[in-house]
Amino acid sequence: MHLNFLDVLSNLVGLFLLIGVGYFSAKAGILPERSSELCTRLLMKITLPCTVFVSLLNDYDPAFLSTTLKLIGLGFILFPLNSLLAKPLARVFRVESEHRGVWEFAGTYCNNGFMGFPIALALFGAEGLAQAAIFGIPFNVLVYTSGAQTICRDTQAKQQAKFNWRTVLFTGVNLATALGLVFYFGRWSVPAMLLTPLTHLSAMTTPLSMIITGINLTKSSIAETFRCRDALTASLNRLLLMPMVSYLVLLAWGRVFSFDSACMFGVVFIIMCMPTAAACTSLSEMYGADREFAARCVFLSTLFCILSIPVMSLLL
C-alpha cells in the first residue's frame, strides 16, 4: 500500500500538535499534576476499548479470519526477534549493566496503544485500527511476561517478575478486541442507542492519548535527558534499527505467506515504528529497576518519533 508522504505528514502534524496542547497545558498549570494518571485510567479502561470495539464492527469478510491469525503470528515473531537482537546491540553500544534490561525493553516494545492506535486510525482508517488492535494481542501478552523478565535482569532490580495471567490477558483492550471479534464473526449488530455513545467515546481516544503523551513529556529534565548516552542509543534502536529489522521481516513474510489486505503491511510496520512503550517506566518502578532511565528512554523516543515516523513512512 503506497502512502502519500504529504498526507502522512499532514495527519501526523495534526496529532503532534495535540501533544503540544498536553505539554503546554501541563506546563502552564491548566492541567493539575495528577491529570495524566486520571486521563490514562479513562483512556485505558473506557475510551480505547470503545475505539477498538467500534473499529471491528465492519461488514463481514471471511478472509478476515486469516488476517487475524497472521497478525497474531507476526506479533509473536517480531517482538521476540527484536528482544533477541537487543541483547548483542546492548553490548555493541556498551550499555551500562545496571540498566541494560531496561535498555533492551525500551528497544523491543513500542507504544502501540497510546500512539500506535491513533496513528493507525489516522493513516489507515477503521480497518487499520482493527488490525492494530489484533496485532496488539501478542504485544500485551509478551510485554508483561518476557518483557518484565528482561527488566528484572538489571542489577538494580530488587525483585523478580511474578505474572498474574488475569491481569495480562483480561485488559480492557483485549476484552474489547475479543468482544468485537465475536460480534464480527457472529455477524451481529449493535443497537443504535448503544452504538451512538460508544462512537462518541471512541472519538475521544485520539485527542486524549496525544494530550496524555504531551503531559508525560513535562516529567523529565530535557537537558539531563539529552546528556544520557544510553537513552539516546535506546531511542536510535527503537525508532530506526528495530523498524528496519521489522521491515525486512515483513518483506520476507509477504513472499512466503502474502498479506490479506492492502493496509496490513503498513499497519504492522507503522506500529513497529512507534516510540518506547509507556509500560517501560511502570514496570521498572514495579520491579525496582532504573525508573529514571526508563522515563528518559520513553521521553526521548517520543520526542524523536515526531521526525522518525514521517521518514520511515516513506518506505510504504
Image (tube, grey):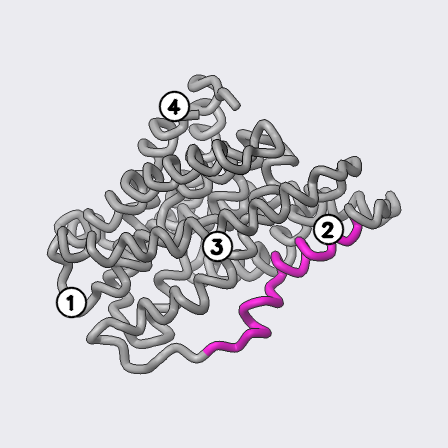
At mark 1, the secondary structure is helix
Magenta-colored segment: predominant secondary structure: helix
Q: Do the numbered discs 4 and 1 sit on residues whose CB atoms are within 8 Å? A: no
Residue drawn at point x = 40 percent, y = 67 percent: 146
Location of mark 4 (residue): 314
Q: Earlier in the sequence, mark 3 or mark 1?
A: 3
Location of mark 2 (residue): 180
Instruction: From the viewer's side, name the closer residue of 76 and 253.
Output: 253
Q: Earlier in the sequence, mark 2 or mark 4?
A: 2
Tag 2: residue type? Gly
Residue drawn at point x = 23 percent, y = 71 percent: 154
Instruction: From the viewer's side, name the closer residue of 288 and 162.
Output: 162
Q: Do the numbered discs 3 and 2 sit on residues whose CB atoms are within 8 Å? A: no
Q: Is residue 267 left or right of residue 218?
A: right
Residue 97, disc: 1
Q: Is disc 1 surrounded by few (<14), some (14 to 19) or many (20+) residues within 10 Å?
A: some
Residue drawn at point x = 48 percent, y = 58 percent: 35
Tag 4: residue type? Leu
Assess whether residue 173 is covered by the magenta stretch: yes
Q: Earlier in the sequence, mark 4 or mark 1?
A: 1
Tag 1: residue type? Ser
Residues in magenta, as a range = 163-183
At mark 2, the secondary structure is helix
